[in-house]
Amino acid sequence: MNSPTPSVCKANSSAGILLIGSVSWALLGAGLQVLATIQLLVPSLAYLLPIPWIGYGHLAPLVSFLFTYGWISSGFLGVLLILIPRISGIPFRYGRLLTSAAILWQFAVLVGLAEILWNGSTGLLSLPFSRSVSVLFFISFLILGTGLTRGLGRSWKSGPLLPRLYLLGGLIAFPLGLGTAELLLRGSLAPGALQIIMQFAWHSFLHHLWLTPLALVLLFQLLPALTGRAAGSLSLGILSWVATITLGGWIGNSLASEGPMPSWLQSAGVVATLLLGVAVLGNTLLFKPLLEGKWEECRRQVALRFFAVGFWSYFASYAWITFLALPGVRQTTTFTMVGQATQALLLFSFYGNVLAGAIYALLPASRSMGWPSHPALAYHFWFTTLGAALLASAYALAGIFQGLALNDPGVPMSTISSYLRPFLVIVLAGQLFWWIGQLAFSSIFFASLLKLFPSVAPVAVFPANRDIPNHPLHPAHH
């Protein structure tokens, strides 16, 4: 096997920085999430601890920010920096620049954390930080995204096509959405109701055109590698890709029921959501045969286990979003906790499981290591899966009951609050379980990086002849 070039080592360093940051932000976000829920259950804490920067109004947007930009986005970029050069055969150039960009992303998360804690959120949906943080994210992404795009060079003519298409769509969507949101929302170019429309559009871009395509890149590339089966029906996959890329940006409009938006725009959002649900069903039909009869492999391979749950969570997340877009349901569940249920399904069940599976599958490829046979692996899976299930189900039931009560003028607000308390207790239990799962994973993750435990042989995701070549035409630039 060829020894890695210095540029490959630097690319691996940037991936390591992004993954270490991802795990660390997930732990911090989980702890702050528990604190925020305790404040909802025990309102008197606000009087006992009158500290504004740890109040619920600061913690709620901060937790969402840490999970979205710190945990998921940083983690996806990290595993893609490992994956892309290995499937294309083209090593990254300018390794130190990639490492600097990875550090810059973590610095942007840190600055955003400090801003939200001290000053609170900006009030903009999925954009709770200042323009300076957006600039840091933008610069970091331009460097990391350029490296990922270069790695796709030769791979357009060989290997699976769908992962490349989803990666291309995601890499275009993030800077396009973030730049447009900054210009319209903070550049005084979007007056009145257009501000609300743009916030929903950016929220859709962030989740359905940036994070979902990156998760699908990993599913389409790694599930066939781990199961030894190829995804069938390329035409169905391309049709689903076209639907995802063209309709994903419209989904947020279906959430704007009773808001200051034209009725035709809300209807367009509903139609787009329903059609995207059909596209998700198409991808489900492609993934399902890969896992049939693989339950024993799922039990033995922790990466495949997480991918299996992530795949079914993909279907469940968009089935739930499609259900919420139905006209009668949409009006009933507006301004309720169903939004938290959607976030729990997307972040914890779908993106989180896919990210965990990718780390388990790909990190040994870049670090020449295997994962130890340790109970923490099982703890990570079961606690995070149970915690995410409790979170999503409790928030969903709470939101539905809350919506029905809010639409009944005979139900006082005090009664509605009493309805929510049992569900919040379940939510708190789910958050604690999920936090324990992350603690178990972090213990094994950092110990494996430091090689404190004896490890077993890693799963062979890439054949030996697909390792990055020690090519003289791609030297490191220091």
Image: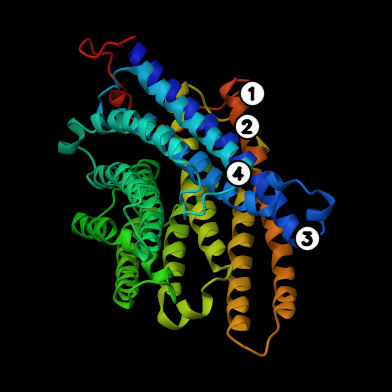
The alpha-carbon separation of the residues under discs 3 and 2 comes to 36 Å
Residue lying at 32% horizontally and 14% vertically, measured from the top left: 2
In the rendered structure, find residue 453 and report the number of the disc placed on it.
1
Residue 454 higher or lower than 422, as above or below: above
| Position in image of residue 121 (x %, y %) | 55, 49
| Amino acid type, label 4 | Asn
The residue carrying mark 3 is 43
Label 1, label 2: how many angstroms apart (C-alpha)?
Answer: 9 Å
Q: With respect to residue 293, does 453 lie above or below?
A: above
Q: Earlier in the sequence, mark 4 or mark 1?
A: 4
Rendered image: mark on residue 444: 2
Residue 64 place in picture, x, y as percent: 55, 50
Label located before the other in sequence (3 or 2): 3
Q: Is residue 335 above or below residue 356?
A: below
Q: Label 2 amino acid?
A: Ile
> Are the two marked residues, 4 and 1, in contact with CB atoms closer than 8 angstroms?
no
In front of the other: label 1 or label 2? 2
Residue corresponding to mark 4: 119
Q: Give x and y (percent) for residue 398.
A: 63, 72
